[in-house]
Amino acid sequence: MDAPRVYQLLLAPISGMPIPSQEIGNAPEVVVRARKTLLHTDICVGLPKQRVSVSMSTTFDRKPHSSDGRIQEIWDEKTQEATRKMFDNSKFRLHALGWTSAEGQSVGSCESTRSCLRIELGLTGYKEYIGTNRRPADDFSMLEDAGRDSFADARAHFSNALGVEALLITIDKTVVLLRRSGAVATNSGEFNGPSGHPEPSAAGISAHCSASASEDQRSMVDAAALNEIYDAVLQEIVEETNVPKSTLSEPLLIGAMEDATHKPDLLFFVQTKLDAEGVRAAMASGAAESWESDNVCFFPLSEMKTCSLPLTAVTRAAFHCFLEINKDGMD
């Protein structure tokens, strides 16, 4: 997998276009400089749900393209190749991220504990994701060029289905890393944290609000989407590790990234009251989505900087954000 772009989530505003990258080793990634005025735990700083808002709109949906007939063709090809059944479930589409003040006005950065992160979301589906973000290279470049020409946005014609990943830390300071099995569609053999997609259907959202919807109705939908994003983080942990939800801390948002296909993910820190052996025992007793991984590694938190395990792009980004946020304490 190509190196991830790590958005400057905890310092600078983020538009629909990438901000300039800086070389870090051999990987082009954006340095995150997070101020420690956000929310403290004993080992991490991040954004709780109360510091984040969601805005949903048809404006933030994927823009149709004349080649959209290819979406069904690619979907049919991929479903025939897949070792497990694929479902065209609804997903949230990430359009942009940016900071707002407590009064809802756009601001340049997270300068105070009163500023909030605003997430702009549209609706998409897994079929659209497979048929746009996972296109062959030539088709992919064509869609980028069309987006730049028509909308000044290379991502305009892509699904950009929003994912979430948890950096799960045990009470004895290890990172829980799952090796992806051969049954998953991508990145088999690489390690990642519990991850997945928030589901609009789980939030009771099947479509955008109508033009006649009241502000209260729109606010309720936005709040439901935000709740689902944070709930999905915990749900993925439970389903992939069998760790009881009652042992998990509230998720803290520590970063955002996109991979080379423009696939975006929000990155979260979660701590469990269990130690490494407790997590291992929970997994051994059976996780609902145990088929997604074939091994588990408990990597020492103190050695994150020198981790040589093959990590997915999303997990590399989560490591990067965590280390930058905790820069002073990890040196």
Image: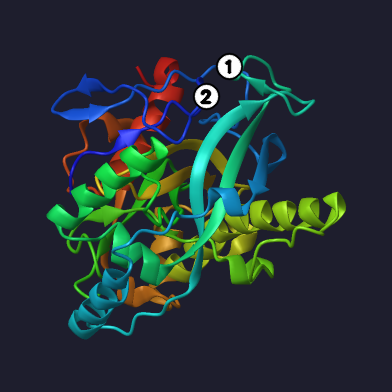
Where does residue 108 sit, x and y in percent of width and height? 58, 16
Give the residue number, with chain letter if any, for mark 2.
Answer: 13
SS at mark 1 in the image: loop
Quarter of the view holding residue 83: bottom left
Identity, as a three-letter code, of the amino acid under mark 2 = Pro
Mark 1 is surrounded, within 10 Å at the Cα level, by few (under 14), some (14 to 19) or many (20 or more) other residues, namely few
236 vs 18: above or below: below
In the image, residue 37 sits, relative to residue 121, either above or below, namely above
Label whose residue precedes the other's in the sequence (2 or 1):
2
The image quadrant where one finds the C terminus is top left
In the displayed structure, does residue 227 sit left or right of residue 166? right
Up/down of 40 relative to 56, above or below: above
Query: Looking at this view, is 123 or 200 the one in front?
Result: 123
Q: Note whether residue 229 is visible.
A: yes
Towards the viewer: 177 or 143: 143
The residue located at (43%, 25%) in the rendering is 8
- Give left or right: position of 149 versus 250: left
Asked if marks 2 and 1 touch (Cβ < 8 Å), the reply is yes
User: What percent of the width, then of the height, locates residue 294?
Assistant: 25, 70
Q: Is 79 or 321 nearer to us in this picture?
A: 79
Residue 105 placement: quadrant: top right
Crowd tier of the residue under label 2, counting other residues whose Cα lies within 10 Å: few below 14, some 14–19, many 20 or above: many
State whether residue 82 appears in this view: no
Figure colour scheme: rainbow
Residue at the (81%, 59%) spot, across then down = 212
Identify the residue at image location x=61%, y=27%: 99
Q: Residue at x 64, y 51 (%)?
A: 56
Q: Amino acid at mark 1?
A: Gly
On residue 108, which mark appears? 1
In percent of width and height, residue 76 lies at 26, 81
Residue sitting nearer the eye, 189 or 133: 133
Query: SS at mark 2?
Result: loop
